[in-house]
Image: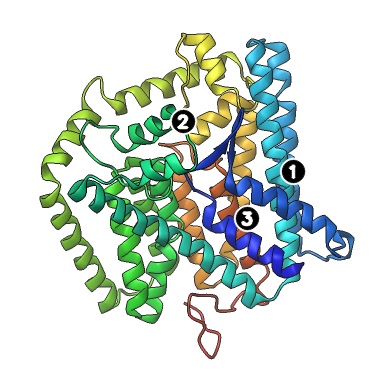
Amino acid sequence: MKKILYVLVILIALSVVLKWFLYFSFRFNYYEILILLFISLFFLSNYNVKSFRLKKELKTYILLLWGWFFLAVLSGSGILFYPQGSNAYLFYLKGILQLFIYSIFLTLLIFYLDSISSEKRNKLLYWFLIGVVISSIYGFVQLVLLKKYGFDIDENIARLVNMTIEQMESIKLERYGYGYLYRLTGITQDPNVHAVYTIMALPLFLLGYISSGRIRHLILFLIVFISLVLSMSDSGLVGFVFAVLALLLLLLGPLKISQLALVLFLIVILVSLYLSYKEHIEYYSKVRFDPHGTIASHIDVAIKSLEISCKYPLGVGYNNFSIAYENQYGISGYNPHNTWLGYLVQMGFIGLFYQVVFSLYIISRCLKKKTILSRAFIASYVGICIASLGYQVLDMFFAQLFTTLFFAVISLDQSKNEYTSLDKPDHPRRV
């Protein structure tokens, strides 16, 4: 049974951003099927949760996780005090049910990680990182086949999994959100999601190369980094910059020759990509920075979101941003393009404050661990939090899985000076 659970976690880690899904009367992601299977088998196995002796930081993490769930439940009172229509109740209940299942899974995942060896825990991290590399390589293959031979892998796979024409067109719209300009999405449905997905691996690949000098780490970094650039995601690129800055602050040491060589190499890559995509980039910039372009529209949504939050300081109810926005401004289907504003509108000032405290707790606990993994994770997490100011990603499940998985593994290290990296040396050492 333990082996089956282990395989399920690997499959979840690999499919957590997969764009294709089952569709009945509602959308059902493949990883959600695996999550339900994991939960069922966990309770059917011989695990006894009461016998576990979790570390204090993991107990606190679980309490904060469930505190967020109950806060989301309480946010439903906003629907009662400020009626948003019948759909508001449906959206709220769907959101709460999904959050409840995710919370159960993440809690059981922590207990499960505590029951397996350090080596197996690290392998699970590697599988998560492999998923990022697979997404990047898939994006390159899709780009080449589409541009050179006119063959669309996405469209053909969508037909195989019986997606509707509307759903197929939705995927195309995300890729070609700027006219003829193709934006790499990998195995995700959105270039911004793929961009944030890459941030979860880039700091670890980069730090792995800096600490060991191994070429394979550099190759992995470059594969994922180029896919990030080709996504042309503002939020992703800004998030990556802040992730690198956080990494430099954590290292605070003299630059090595390898680091300088890497910086120069990245500059060459960026210049080469710019020259190859110059016409596309100019068109992209024109659309983005036009007075009526996408950035202006995002700013407009942000301002209106603040107006809604001032009107409903306790929130309009979990998963009800689009409903409240439509009721207030008559425009349907909107999202805030900002995780933090989403929390503010849906769960009020209390919800926003709670998430800030939760995030600071995660960072503060990991700062006490002086390992490669802890430093790379902090850099990634900072980058994700910054990217979430430009796109709604921090509250997506793949970000929650990443955070829980890495935080648990870091917390379960035997010593704060224990070496945790892509390559384990013969003796523990600090960076």
Spatial CA span between label 2 and label 1 = 36 Å
Disc 1: CA contacts within 10 A as few (<14), some (14-19) or many (>=20): some
Q: Which residue is disc 2 drawn over? A: 164
Spatial CA span between label 1 and label 3 = 13 Å
Q: Which residue is disc 1 drawn over? A: 66
Q: Which residue is disc 3 drawn over? A: 404
Q: Which mark's residue is nearer the viewer, 3 or 2?
A: 2
- Vertical side of 275 occupied by 301: above or below: above
State the residue lying farthest toward the bottom: 426
Q: Is residue 321 left or right of residue 40?
A: left
First reached walking from the N terminus: tag 2 or tag 1: 1
Helix, strand or loop under label 3 = helix
Disc 3: CA contacts within 10 A as few (<14), some (14-19) or many (>=20): many
Name which residue type carries label 2: Thr
| Percent position of residue 3, x then y | 71, 70
Name which residue type carries label 3: Thr
| Percent position of residue 340, x then y | 52, 34
Taking the spot 42% from the left edge, 21% from the top edge, the residue there is: 301
Total marks in image:
3
Depth order, front residue of 40/76? 40
Depth order, front residue of 335/304? 335
First reached walking from the N terminus: tag 3 or tag 2: 2
Residue 12, by quadrant, is: bottom right
